[in-house]
Image: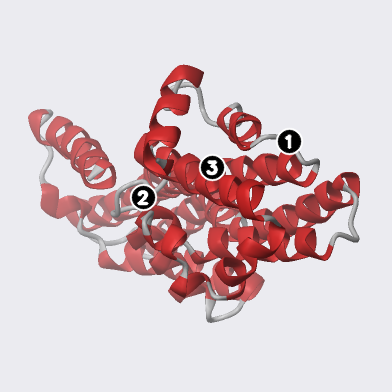
Amino acid sequence: MQLIIGVVVLMGAILGGFIMAGGQIAVLMQISEFIVIGGAGIGSMIVSHGVGVIGEVLKEIMGLLKPDLYTKVAYKELLKMMYQLFNLSRREGLLALEGHVERPAESEIFQKYPTFANNPHAVHFLCDTLKVILTGTVSPMDLSDMMDSDLEASHKEEMDIPTLMQGVGDAMPGFGIVAAVLGVVITMGSIGGSPAEIGHHVAAALVGTFLGVLMAYGVFGPLSTAMKGRVEGEHAYMNAIKNALISFGRGEAPMTCCEFARRNIEPLIRPGFSEMEEFVKEKAA
């Protein structure tokens, strides 16, 4: 919804102002300029990342149409789930977790919390780390380094598309200049023609510059920022899990483990300690 509203406001303001100033929308419909700039942008993506990247870009853009996964509700479910899991280990021993981490799809605890259970990355990260803890052969410091390496590799991969979008956005004004220069070349070839014909070619060349700047700062730049925001949201969620697991690996109490996770949550959606204590214990009971 945020993406749709933003596009409507952006295009409405630009085209509305153009029309109010006496402009005609048909003048901006220069298909050749769209082909030059759009084709150059797509081509640069393929050169740097291969043909398959186009599908990944479209997938990421469509993902922006979906609601943000990492809301206060998602974090509350995460804290509840981890408290219940850690509390089970404290009551019945580490081996009580084995069934949950080996077969997460069958875990009664995980399935109670759909925002976590439907997040494969989070489920695998939690379960794989708990398997390491269950072996009892890794120190908390080594466990932290191991999780940091995992999260760093994942974060780098997830930032590929946002970084690519930012790079193409930075190149768009240049592609706009290329389109404008080609338009000028065509204009120079029409010098002997009528003023109307020359004016048409000049307008088409200027539309190329306009499109390049618009795509850079009105489309690719904002899309890249929005994608980075989603990636950072997931990274914060995974870090909350990591901090709780480090605390659990040190043998600390379930509530202390959850507090380490809570402190990693963005302040705007972070529950207070008393609030967390109340809802996790209520669910566990």
> Is label 2 in a helix, a strand or a loop?
helix
Can you identify the residue that label 2 sits on? 211
Where does the image place residue 53, in percent across and percent down from the top left?
53, 73
Q: Residue 83 carries which label?
A: 3
Question: Is the C terminus in the top left, top right, bottom left or bottom right quadrant?
Answer: top left
Amino acid tagged 1: Glu
Amino acid tagged 3: Tyr
Mark 3 residue crowding within 10 angstroms, few (<14) / some (14–19) / many (20+): many
Can you identify the residue that label 1 sits on? 252
Residue at screen point 27% across, 41% down: 2
> Is label 3 in a helix, a strand or a loop?
helix
> Is label 1 in a helix, a strand or a loop?
loop
Q: Is residue 199 left or right of residue 52?
A: left
Residue at screen point 30% across, 54% down: 66
Q: Mark 1 or 2 closer to N-term?
A: 2
Answer whether residue 190 is visible to the viewer in this image.
no
Q: Which residue lies furthest to the front in this view?
A: 92
Residue at screen point 49% across, 40% down: 79
Amino acid tagged 2: Leu
